[in-house]
Amino acid sequence: MNKKTKILVMAARLAWFFLFCFQTAALGQTAGLTESFKETPTVTEDESTDSMLPHPSDGRFWVSGQMNFISQAHPDFDAKYTGTNSLLPNYEKATSRVLTVYTGVRLNNSIELIGDAEEAGGQALSQALGLAGFSNLDAVRNPSLSKNPYLARAIFHKVIALSNEKVENERGPMSNFTELPERRIDIRFGKFTAPDFFDINSVGSDSHFQFMNWATAQNGAYDYAADTRGYTWGAVVEYQAKNYAFRAGDMLMPKIANGIDMEWSLRKAHAENFEFELRKGLLPKKDGTVRLLSYINHANMGIYRDAVAQYKAGLTPVPEITDHPWHTTIKYGFGVNIEQALSANLKAFARWGWNNGKTESFVYTEIDSTFVAGLGANGHLWHRNKDRAGAAIASNAISKDHQNYLADGGLGFILGDGRLNYGREQIFETYYTAHVWRGLYISPDLQHVNNPGYNRDRGPVLIPGLRLHVEL
């Protein structure tokens, strides 16, 4: 099957899924949604996240906010050489911030609107360069971006009921419903970030309370559609049942790698995402979830092998991944995401990710394969009910073509030491999030990175950090 045929097949499958969703609308109207919602939240008071301001358990409107500050530093570390995109080997420190206002309104019992405004700024260590698994998920990768507030999310959400049975839903920034049909179709479109819906993990997804590293808080090999700040425009359709779910999405890609401007022509660029979710533990009588992810990106991406060939032929002074005419290429990948309860207050999680590695890393980071495993603990274990703690290890790798490109002096949008003595990038991270008062949380964090940027000639580097989070 050639590339054109593959594209047509994937487009047909996605179109069929959307058509199925709209055809079932009539059934949804018959099944209906309840006119009255329960006021009981899905978590106990001790397990919930405290906030500075009260949030009613019911109501048409939702307004909240958050402030997240992360300060990190690293001491001097050994480096035989330093290139354009290297983590700087001398002592440095940096503080980032992300401020968000969340709003939502429920128009009726099946439709809601979500709108968020955000401001991100501050600095990242070495301008967020030199680590494939960078140490701060909040870091803005382009410091020249405007510091003005911007629209982060604008989501239209339609629920189509397929059953009369109801399940409770915790109200929050991403949903204003307190109760939903157990079996349903969720249709969302607008502006969002792909990890709002794909590759979610209750132990390792929230950089405001949990892990901070790009490779421990998300699947590093998932080169998901996004602009520089991590957001995109698109549509996501989910089928939700009691014990499983399936979701599919089509999203815009940026015009250039790590770019802020999106390509609005779907013929030139777009991203297809698919995920199956099975809510069943791997251990007997223990809750758990398994998620299987696949994605296909279509964009103006370079080919590492072609860039190296141009360099070897003397056409460029170093390999240059962007030195090519406009052409749409394909990058695809897969992921496995597992979370498993070990006890009432202790969970394990793991992720595996892989992408083809021949096509330019374009959006998230320069990781072609990854494996992550860790633990997350609830403070109930030590009688600090709103605290939490975790530890994880990540092992990242890149393809042989990607290795050759960097070894010959090529630059990606994250990496480029000028040379490369290749070794897997190994990361260990641990954190403790302490509840101080109401919506105030403080989190010491420690990360150790071996072979930063896959380079045995540099590091290891130790990165201590401190996070201050305010939930409004």
Image (spheres, rainbow, N blue to C red):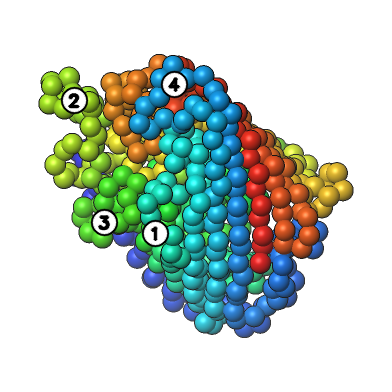
Q: Which residue is mark 4?
A: 455
**For this view, does 430 lie left or right of residue 143?**
right
Q: Nearer the viewer, mark 1 or mark 4?
A: 1
Kind of residue at disc 1 = Ser
**For this view, does 352 lie left or right of residue 390?**
left
Q: Which mark is residue 263?
A: 3
Kind of residue at disc 2 = Pro
Q: Which residue is mark 2?
A: 317
As drawn, the residue found furthest toward the front would be: 91
Q: Residue visible at 29% across and 35% down?
A: 359
Asked if labels 4 and 1 touch by Cβ distance under 8 angstroms, the answer is no
Mark 2 crowd level (few <14, some 14–19, many ≥20, 10 Å Cα): few
Q: Name the foreground residue: 412 vs 76.
A: 76
Q: Position of residue 312 (x, y in %)?
A: 17, 19
Question: Element type at marker 3?
Answer: strand
Q: Nearer the viewer, mark 3 or mark 1?
A: 1
Q: Position of residue 103 (x, y in %)?
A: 55, 73
Q: Nearer the viewer, mark 2 or mark 3?
A: 2
Question: Element type at marker 1?
Answer: loop
- The Cα atoms of the two marked residues, 1 and 2, are separated by 33 Å
Mark 1 crowd level (few <14, some 14–19, many ≥20, 10 Å Cα): few
